[in-house]
Amino acid sequence: MTAATNDRHRLTRRRLRFCTIGVFLVFGLFGARLFQIQGIDASAYAAASIQAGTQPQTQPAPRGNILDRNGAQLATSVDGLTIVADPTLTTANAPQIARILREELGDEIDYFDTIDTLRTPKTRYVVLARDIPKWTADKAVAALQEAQLAGVSTEKETLRTYPGGSLAANLLGYVNGAGKGVAGLEQQYDKTLTGTDGSSTYEVSPTGQRIPMADSTVTKMVPGQDVKTTIDRDLQWYADQRLTDAVAESSSDWGLAITMDVKTCQIVQMSQSPTFDADTRTGMDDSNTVSRAVQNVYEPGSVMKTVTMAALADQGKIAADTPISVPSSLTIDKFRIGDYWEHGRINLTAAGVIAKSSNLGTIVAAQQMSDQTMYDYFTKFGFGQKTGVNLPGESNGILTDGASWTKANHATISFGQGVSVTAMQMMRAVGAIANAGTMCEPTVVTGTVDAEGTETPVESAPGHRVVSKDAAATVTRMMEAVTADDGTAPAAQIEGYRVAGKTGTAWRVDPQTGRYIRGQNTVSFMGFAPADNPRFLTYIVLDKPYSNAGGGSTAAPVFHDIMSMALERFGVAPSGSKSPKVEQTW
């Protein structure tokens, strides 16, 4: 063997050793990596593998319905879809996908924002559009499939809808874009109405398709509970329309109409105009979405005279036929007070003071009470306090402490000026007179109903007596004189029924200056029927109507129509007797 041959053999063996060592090093590295993956980090890599091939999906819980007293839906939820995408499948074709979605969905999406969303890095799940009606979303996804553009799908969700449109809108409230209640019953009972979402996670193929029979994880959703209200849908609809007409005809800024069952304090109808439509999202500015029945305060005017007379009657200081010498005017704390009509000294009975709505006669009668006594009675009737109706944003109203009253305060508060109330406070107070002196908390909800149909009643506070039964009966007789032919509100008469009522006209207060605006009034009418066995109380308020509008001429006709509908709707039997004749003068 030559030297050259030996050199070649040595070089070959050297190369073989290097190759062998190299192979062992490569296999060693692979082995170490395999040991790390399968031994040390097995769980982490398995989870990452599963995550890369799985698709999470939320199963939204349907929001509970809001029902009227008979089970009719006032607010409900319908099927809708959320359009989602997997950017790992849509990045390359983002412009084409965005174009088709824009054509199908219109203003629901923005073309350029959608392209950016479809190209979102490091994720397999993005939301393109929410709250899309099912047929619209299905049509859009079908168009993408026809164009063979993968990666876009839909998820079920629920959309809030209000079948009656603006019906009882200020009572029901509405939900925001996230489905959370932000006003009315939607807000007050949001936790009850909101269910618990379910979820599911399932394996998908590299093209994003669900793999049949593959492992999946499911958490069941729990539907929200229904809220059953005291509202009668048909009466509510009629009152909404009648009030809207009255506001327009009287050129009022706004109006309220509320009807309550005086035996149970259930609100069977609560209307406001102008209002809004949460279904179409129209008219939804602050002046329309506010619930004026519980949030707005105003001076009630002469309707408050019923409370003053009830306080006096409860103390035995007055009866329907008590003679009162009414002066032509009074000057108290350098403030001249008169009646709405000019007169000299006249002789009215207490019933005549109410029937004619005499401020001066009320002041004379109220002078029999001290500041503290009168304040205590007004407090017993619930002024300066929330009513307990359980609606969001309720105001306390304004009743200053009796210890700080001036003589002028005592005088004006007796006839409903210098005290601010909510309409619901006035309902509760006069409702106590209609209910034989017993006051209860107004309520708009009777209970909740779960998915199995089990109804859970809402507990209501027991009623409590504020004046005697005799005192309430005395004031009722006075109020019947108001609706007599020679009273201030004969337009409130209802054929076959005895009606007790009281008009109200009060100067409006400028919210900017805190001063009265002469020539601008809030007019109202409060009444109940049948007066001999009261069942319903209806209150009409019209703010800033035309200059010569009055409670008897403008609000009483609205009362007549809504009360007539309530009596008929609930089958209330006519009165068995005519209203007794009550002398108004002496």
Image: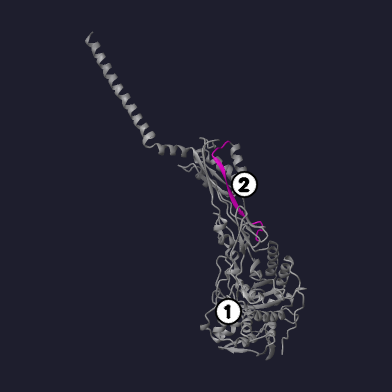
Circle 2 residues within 10 Å: few <14, some 14–19, many ≥20: some
Residue at label 2?
A: 134
Q: Is residue 164 above or below residue 266?
A: above
Element assignment for label 2 = helix
From the viewer's perspective, tell me whether residue 345 is left or right of residue 373: right
Whether residue 149 appears in magenta in the rendering, the answer is yes
State the extent of the magenta-drawn residues as a range: 148-166
Q: Quadrant of residue 313?
A: bottom right
Label 1 sits on residue = 378
Eyeballing the image, is 415 above or below 558?
below
Label 1, label 2: how far apart the Cα atoms are: 55 Å
What is the three-letter code of the residue carrying label 1?
Answer: Phe
Query: Is 423 in front, or is 103?
Result: 423
Please identify the quarter of the rendering in which residue 253 is found: bottom right
Residue 387, given in percent of the width and then of the height, sits at 58, 71
Q: Where is 307 relative to 238, above or below?
A: below
Measuring from the top left, give residue 541's x and y in whole percent.
Answer: 65, 72
Q: Which element is circle 1 on?
A: helix
| Quarter that holds the C terminus | bottom right
Quarter of the image for residue 478 reads bottom right
Residue 571 tag number:
none
The amino acid sitting under disc 2 is Lys
Give x and y (percent) for residue 182.
55, 60
